[in-house]
Amino acid sequence: MAIKTDMSKAYDRVEWSFVDLLLRKLGFCDKWVSWIMSCVTTVQYKVLINGQAHGSITPFRGLRQGDPLSPYLFILCTEALIAQFRKAEQLKLITGIKVSTASPAISHLLFADDSLFFCRATKEQCEVVLRILRKYERASGQQINFQKSSVQFGHTVDHGLREELKGVLGITNLGGMGSYLGIPESLGGAKTQIFSYVQDRLQSRASSWPARLLSKGGKEVMIKSVATAVPTFVMSCFRLPKTITRKLTSAISNYWWSSSGQSRGLHWVAWDKLCQDKTEGGLGFRGLDDFNTALLAKQLWRLISVLDSLFARVFKGRYYRHSDPLDPIKSYSPSYGWRSIISARSLVNKGLIKRVGSGVSISVWHDPWIPAQSPRPAIGTGLSSDHLLSVQNLINRSSNSWDMALLSATFVPEDVALISALPLRLPDKPDSLGWHFTKSGNYTVKSGYHLLQSSTAASVVLSVVGSNYVPLQAFVWKIRCPPKLRHFMWQVISGCVAVTANLRKRGISCDPVCGLCGFEEETINHALFECPPARQVWALSQFPTVQGAFPSESILTNIDFLFWRFKDVPSQDRFPWILWYIWKARNDKLFSNLDSNPLAILRLAEDEANAWFLAQTEGVDSEEGHPLLGIPSDGGIRVSRFSRPTSSLLCFVDGSWKATDQFSGRGWFCVSPGGDGPTMGASNLRRSLSPLHAEIEALIWAMRCMIGADNQSVVFLTDCSDLVKMVSSPSKWPAFTPYLEDVQADREEFTSFSLVYVPRTQNGKTDKLARHVRAVPYLVIFVNNLSSHWLV
């Protein structure tokens, strides 16, 4: 049976003395506890009356809602409740639920103040649960609201026993039809009906948004930040039916194209095209089906990567006890949650790569271990006949390096270069799984979604009269102007502006004649460039108008000129405002019969542009120095301002990588605190897998050079922020585990070690060293015997 409890005023009833004693019991030091309790107990409240604060209320218990500390403290408080349930389990007083014989028993599930407790449907175990809850109430000050709590029984519990247990607990509500954490407790029946509440929730949200008051830029933010976030939690747990995702997509699409919020609007471009990335001509909206798959793949990845989690242990005991969650095994009566998760297997398999440890479990010809554009098995020369060849056979363990002679004889040159760049761990380290499409090696929903979009969506190239305008659409988002102007230019390029020619193509009956000049057909190009009022605005502007060149008869040619051909024109970046106010003047004439002077249009556009650019520059600090290091913007180094031990050296490091070069470059430049002359080094080695691999290889080499020179207190400085992140949090970067193990081992040789990020402008000398040595056509190592021109 399951008991779902509701805490009455959960945060407001927590006793301060309970929090204090609990923190000390958990082992926090007295000073830290006093700091936390000071934050908790120095709270005062006032009452707002007509916007004015009145009175003063000083509480003596409770955690302040909205305080970022409060959720963490509340979770720590529940540790006391959890400890009581675990003790009762150990004493066999209660028995948790098990979904299978091999799965662990679960007696409780808690998320903040939402609690579920499980026990056997007997009077004795119910009394134990009730006794624990009452004890927790007395200690913490919490109070369970039994009127809002509910209980749910297994189908084998008879009616009489159910009524008896409900009486013991004092809970009369029967559960199973409500929700837990916003998800239905029961998923039996038609899934379209069960998940219809998601559609209703999104529809109510969208109907409350003021569509008429938002520009396209504002609508984009609302859709990406709010609309697609509404079903995210449900989609991360279950596969939504196609019917639901279609209705959700329809609601979002209608909101995007509607001008009033009451109608569906005129859908100028198919939603699938809008869901393409902005670099591919779309608007970057999310396709819900692919997003659903990417979210479910995150859960599948957790089953693979976090093996000791309760989530993984429960599912392993039920569905893949002696195998792997990626294996296509059949399960008896699988739950909808499991069927949803394994529906993402194909996505995970596309990006799964096996990382080399000992190499024992990796098949050379069958497993995806080569880090090519997509993970794949190795490609042989055809000379090897060993179909059972494993990666361990390719490693010379006496030197813990790749057997280059065997690699060259077995694989094609492309794979030899990739394999030789793979770092090797110690022989006792196991092989592992990783995600190929992120730098860190961990799966992310973003990378999974992009992989789905690139592999499943047909590459649609929008064209007009044989011209590909995707580059124009992609460049729009790089232009410095307000979002609504970018969206307007994207619509101009995409041909979805409501001129009469386009309206007639969509079957809307209207007069095709231009309402300003009487020309026989009003196209987008005519309205913005060829109509006499528009032509006069361009003639008055600083853009040179040349007959047959600009403005021309092609909208794409004209936009191309504005984007790329007028770089030498003063105030060239004002053209988005000129386009916008030409369009507004056209609308004012047609709908309000207001005439606009071309010079006034141009002046208004320029004034608005100048005001916008001024607003972007206000408050921007032009100082480019590094305050922490005391590095001025001229590139010099003022070591005296750097807060470090006076004996520490400053060692700048950098790696250089280019896909077409044979080698990668590594460089370091060391400054002494005593004012002695700098030392430096540069070397090259076989091309690394990526620029980030070159950066960490450069750091390891610089560390070993410092160790060799007996420099024990060193501050290393790099212009690669990812390098700083991975060294500070190595567990989050499994793709670089071999390197990070070396960094961890080498840093033990230092009495003082730190790695600091600096701007690229402050790392110029090291960058030059790495670039120059990368270009040397043979392997070299230079330490303090470099050519002076390499620093210039």
Image: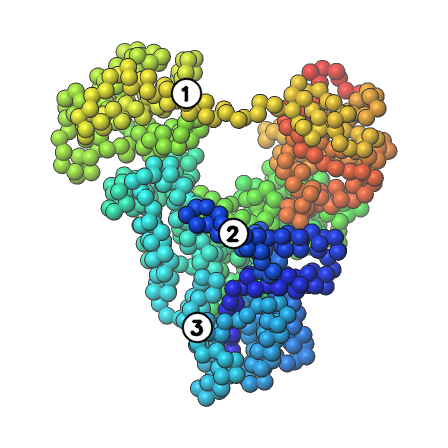
Q: If you read the primary sequence from the N terminus, does the residue marked by circle 1 or circle 2 appear first?
A: 2
Q: Give the numbered dot on residue 322.
A: none
Pointer 3 residue: 176
Between tags 3 and 1, which lies in front? 1
Badge 2 crowding class, 10 Å Cα cut-off, few under 14, some 14 to 19, many 20 or more, is few
Residue 160, percent from left and from top: 46, 88
Disc 2 designates what residue?
55
C-alpha gap between disc 2 and disc 3: 45 Å
Residue pictured at 69% horizontal, 37% vertical: 696
Label 1: which secondary element: helix
Q: CA distance from mark 1 to mark 2?
A: 48 Å
Which image quadrant is residue 57 in? Answer: bottom right
**Residue at x-position 75% and y-position 32%:** 643
Residue 625 in the image: x percent, y percent?
A: 65, 24
| Number of dots carrying numbers | 3
* Residue kind at label 2, given as amino acid type: Gly
Nearer to us in this view, 290 or 615: 615
Q: Is residue 700 left or right of residue 501?
A: right
Left or right, residue 196 beside residue 703: left
Mark 1 highlights which residue? 610
Asked whether the residues under the numbered discs 1 and 2 touch, taking CB atoms below 8 Å apart as contact, a structural biologist would say: no
Q: Position of residue 183 (x, y in %)?
A: 44, 63
